[in-house]
Image (tube, rainbow, N blue to C red):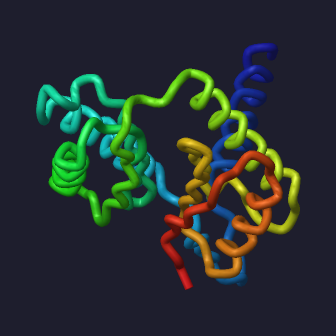
């Protein structure tokens, strides 16, 4: 009797679990969130970033000690950091464009020595301020916007509508310490 009851409980639990995994049919249309990226796209963006930085640092001995970062959102790449010369900036941009699945490259590398620890720490603080303001604001999923700061310049990236991009710039502009804001959005409207 106890064994039979355990079997019924186990079967009931399995049915409840299986029904939770089954999609619920509805007469409402399926909505497509065009501003979000799939797991595959997120993985590709991470792979793009890693591949670009590796390719740039291996391109020439002059770039081995450069401070270079690549940020990719939906195959659109932002290059930031410092390189020793205009020629190395051009080489870095060319290397980035050759990476698979890269759709566009924004080469914002500066020709200068690597930024100091103090400058990088300040950039991190600015990014934190901007993201905090975005999360605190209502009406828009701030997780769809990537905020990156380099030398006091705030770069805003993501898949957004024109109105959402304008909203992000307004919110970001209220943070202190920003030299300028650069939009690197891909507009979906």
Q: Which residue is rendered at x = 27% and y = 58% of the image? A: 102
Q: Which residue is outermost to the top?
A: 2
Classify 52 as above or below 158: above
Classify 163 as above or below 184: below
The front one of 18 and 37 is: 37
Classify 179 as above or below 124: below
The front one of 30 and 139 is: 139
Q: Position of residue 58 (x, y in %)?
A: 15, 30
Q: Position of residue 42 (x, y in %)?
A: 45, 48
In which quarter of the view is residue 81 placed? top left
> On the rendered structure, is 126 left or right of 157?
right
Q: Quadrant of the C terminus?
A: bottom right
The front one of 186 and 170 is: 170
Classify 142 as above or below 62: below
Q: Position of residue 2 (x, y in %)?
A: 80, 14
Q: Which residue is rendered at x = 42% and y = 60% of the image? A: 74
Q: How many marks?
A: 0
Q: Which residue is rendered at x = 70% and y = 75% of the image? A: 166
> On the rendered structure, is 76 left or right of 167?
left
Q: Position of residue 63 (x, y in %)?
A: 22, 31
Q: Which residue is outermost to the left?
A: 60
Query: Is residue 75 at all visible to an observer of this figure?
Result: no
In which quarter of the view is residue 73 placed? bottom left
Q: Quadrant of the N terminus?
A: top right
């Amino acid at each position: 009797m106890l064994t039979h009851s355990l079997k019924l409980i186990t079967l009931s639990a399995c049915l409840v679990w299986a029904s939770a995994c089954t999609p619920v049919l509805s007469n409402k249309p399926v909505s497509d969130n065009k501003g979000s990226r799939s797991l595959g796209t997120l993985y590709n963006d991470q792979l793009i970033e890693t591949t670009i930085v590796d390719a740039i640092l291996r391109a020439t001995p002059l770039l081995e000690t450069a401070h270079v970062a690549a940020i990719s959102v939906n195959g659109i790449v932002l290059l930031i950091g410092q390189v020793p010369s205009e020629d190395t900036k051009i080489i870095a941009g060319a290397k980035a464009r050759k990476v698979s699945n890269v759709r566009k490259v924004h080469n914002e590398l500066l020709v200068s020595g690597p930024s100091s620890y103090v400058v990088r720490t300040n950039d991190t603080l600015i990014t934190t301020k901007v993201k905090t303001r975005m999360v605190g604001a209502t009406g828009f999923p701030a997780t769809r916007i990537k905020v990156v700061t380099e030398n006091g310049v705030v770069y805003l990236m993501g898949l957004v509508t024109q109105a959402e991009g304008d909203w992000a710039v307004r919110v970001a502009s209220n943070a202190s310490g920003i030299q300028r804001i650069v939009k690197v959005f891909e507009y979906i409207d």
